[in-house]
Amino acid sequence: MSEGGERIAKRIARAGVCSRREAERRIFEGRVRLNGQALRDPAVNVGPQDLVEVDGAALADPEPARLWRYHKPAGLVTTDYDPEGRPTVFESLPAHLPRVVSVGRLDLASEGLLLLTNDGALARELELPSRGWVRRYRARVRGRVDEARLARLAKGVEIAGMRYGSIAASLDEQRGGNAWLTVALAEGRNREVRRVLEHLGHPVNRLIRTAYGPFQLGNLPRGAVAEIRRKTLREQLGRNF
C-alpha cells in the first residue's frame, strides 16, 4: 500500500482487466486482493511494489494503450455478461484481441462503430463529456419527416423532465413510410437518439453509429475489428502513445 501511487481501481483499469467502475465493483465483491489480503475498499492507493490480484490472477504490467474500431452488429449486448443469456460483444470478438473494454455502449438493436481499448482509464477519458466529441448516426425512422421540426432540435428538447442538449438532425431520404436521417450529438446519453426521435413521432427501426469523435466507421465490414495506428492516437489524443 502506498501513500502516493494511484488508486487501485485505476491500476486494474490500466492493466486492461476491466473499466475502473467495474474494478470498484469487483473490490466491493471481495474479488481483489492487495499484497495477499482481501480488499473491499477502493479508496486505496497502490505503488509499483504492491501485488494486486483480481479473481486470483496477479495483474500484469500495464501494456501500452491501444484502441480499435469495431463494427458492432445488431443483436449483441455491450457487456461482459448478460444475465438474460443474450450474446455479447465481447463473446463475438476475434480471439487474437487482448482483453478489452468498450468506450461507451451501443444498445442491443443498434449497430455501427464501437471503440474498444485495452486500457480502462483511456476508455473513461474518451467518454468524458468535456471532450465535446460528436457522435454521428444514420437513423431509419417511421413516418413522414418534417424538416422544420428536425431543425428545432438544434435548440435542445425536454422529454419527461429530462433536458437533452443540441442535436443536429437532417433528412437524407424519404422512402414511403420510412425516412433516413443523419443525426449528430455531443452528449450521447443512454438511448438519446431513439428517445428524441420517438418524441417527434418517428420511432427508430434501424440505428447505425458512423463516427465517434474523429474516428469513423468507414467501410469496416460488419463484425470486423481494425486497430487505430499509434500515430493517429498521438495526433487525436495528445498523449505519449
Image (spheres, rainbow, N blue to C red):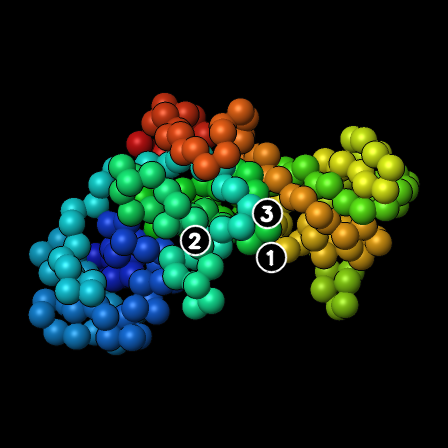
Q: Is residue 60 left or right of residue 226?
A: left
Tell me the residue that label 1 is attached to: 190
Q: Determine whether the residue tagged by mark 1 lies in a helix, strand or loop.
A: loop
Q: Earlier in the sequence, mark 2 or mark 1?
A: 2
Q: Amino acid at mark 2?
A: Thr
Identify whether 164 is placed above or below 222. Answer: below
Provide residue 109's location: percent of width, then percent of height. 59, 51
Q: Determine whether the residue tagged by mark 3 lies in a helix, strand or loop.
A: loop
Q: Amino acid at mark 3?
A: Ser
- Observer-side mark, 3 or 1, equals 3
Tell me the residue that label 2 is attached to: 88
Q: Residues within 10 Å of mark 1 (few under 14, many from 20)?
A: few
State the CA–CA distance, disc 3 to disc 1: 12 Å
Residue in view at x 77 percent, y 52 percent = 203
Q: CB of mark 2 within 8 Å of CB of mark 1?
A: no
State the CA–CA distance, disc 2 to disc 1: 18 Å
Identify whether 204 is placed above or below 216. Answer: below
Residue 155 visible somewhere in the drawing: no
- When asked about the image quadrant of residue 93, the answer is top left
Provide residue 24's location: percent of width, then percent of height. 33, 67
Residue in view at x 38 percent, y 57 percent = 80
Tell me the residue that label 3 is attached to: 110
